[in-house]
Amino acid sequence: MTMGRSPKALGAAILVLLFRSLNAASLPVVKPYPRLEDLPKNLWHELSSPFTEVYEEESLATEIGATPEPRPFFEDADSNITAQLGTHVHMHCRVHDLRDGTVSWVRKRGEELHLLTFQTFTYSNDARLSLDYQPPNDWRLLLRYVTELDAGVYECQVTAHPPLIRVVYLTVSVPKVEIVDERGATAGDKFYKAGSTIELKCVVSKVPHPSGYVTWRHGSRMLNYDTTRGGISVKTDMGAEGAVSRLYIANANKKDSGNYSCALADVAATTVSVHVLNGENPAAMQHGGSAGLRAAFALTFALSISSLLR
């Protein structure tokens, strides 16, 4: 004995048939289902709810002893992936035995599901998103130039009975870039005596998969490959989760004063002010943070008080 379909299951079946008939029409438009994005926001949530009805086709196959057709299944389980800020990331969805089924990607925000792609067509208004299908069965979602706001839950959904859902949890790693002194503390203003060697150390951390390279600039001038001044060298050591880069400038002079920046590609950067002193009090000339600035201020203050007491 078979059971009839509930209104909910019947609606899902009608929707699937509608998709197939529209696809068969081969209309000359970019989006084969132009009204798909206008469907109620909770539609995909409703279709994702587990089906408990017994379908006539399945029951009939059981009664006559026939072997049911293989159901689609995912090659991979749910996953957690981490992408570095500003990079591109693929979210994979490998589906076996898809047959006449369809694949959709949705973004989950709270209780709402937002349609991103349906089959190979993109329905998101975000131009960074697209379906980058890789034969034979990987319906991977491509997200370019990742931002912090992209972190969250993404679902790959396959039309089946019940529907199949694979969840991808995306985390965005934001690199940290610091110019530090000899003690590892974040450097403020740096003071150097004319003729000495400027040495700046830049530490890049929180980078799960280092990409790009560390660049140094004096104002707007790139220093990594600078040959005009002479005496400039950059040494960068890449690690598993970051990098340490050192800038050396020999025989410092007044023209070397100014703002120096260290950057990881176009993702993150930091700046420090360098002062080259020529003939000023030696207390203001040091190689490690703002201690020299405080010493110079204290000396100037003491001299001022002394002159007032004379």
Image (tube, rainbow, N blue to C red):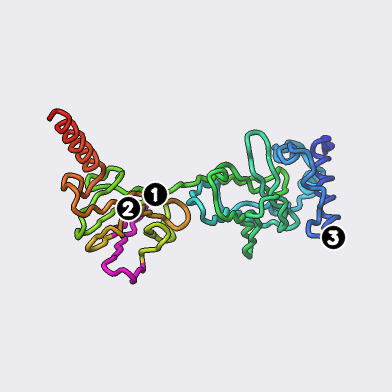
Measured in 3D between alpha carbons, the distance from the residue under mark 1 to the one under mark 3, in whole angstroms, is 56 Å
The label number, if any, that marks residue 24 in the structure image? 3
**Residue denoted by label 2:** 202
* Quadrant hosting residue 122: bottom right
Up/down of 215 relative to 115, above or below: below
Q: Is residue 1 visible?
A: no
Which segment did they paint magenta? 225-247
Q: Tell me the SS state at disc 3.
A: helix
At 25% from the left and 56% from the top, the residue drawn is: 199
Which callout, 2 or 3, points at the residue further toward the start of the chain?
Answer: 3
Q: Residue furthest top?
A: 309
Circles 2 and 3, Cβ within 8 Å, touching? The answer is no
At 54% from the left and 56% from the top, the residue drawn is: 88
Q: Is residue 108 visible?
A: yes
Which residue type carries mark 2? Cys
Specify the quadrant that holds the N terminus. top right
Which callout, 2 or 1, points at the residue further toward the start of the chain?
Answer: 2
How far across and down, in percent of the image, does residue 137 sit?
63, 60
Which residue type carries mark 1? Thr
Up/down of 130 relative to 310, above or below: below
Q: Is residue 125 magenta?
A: no
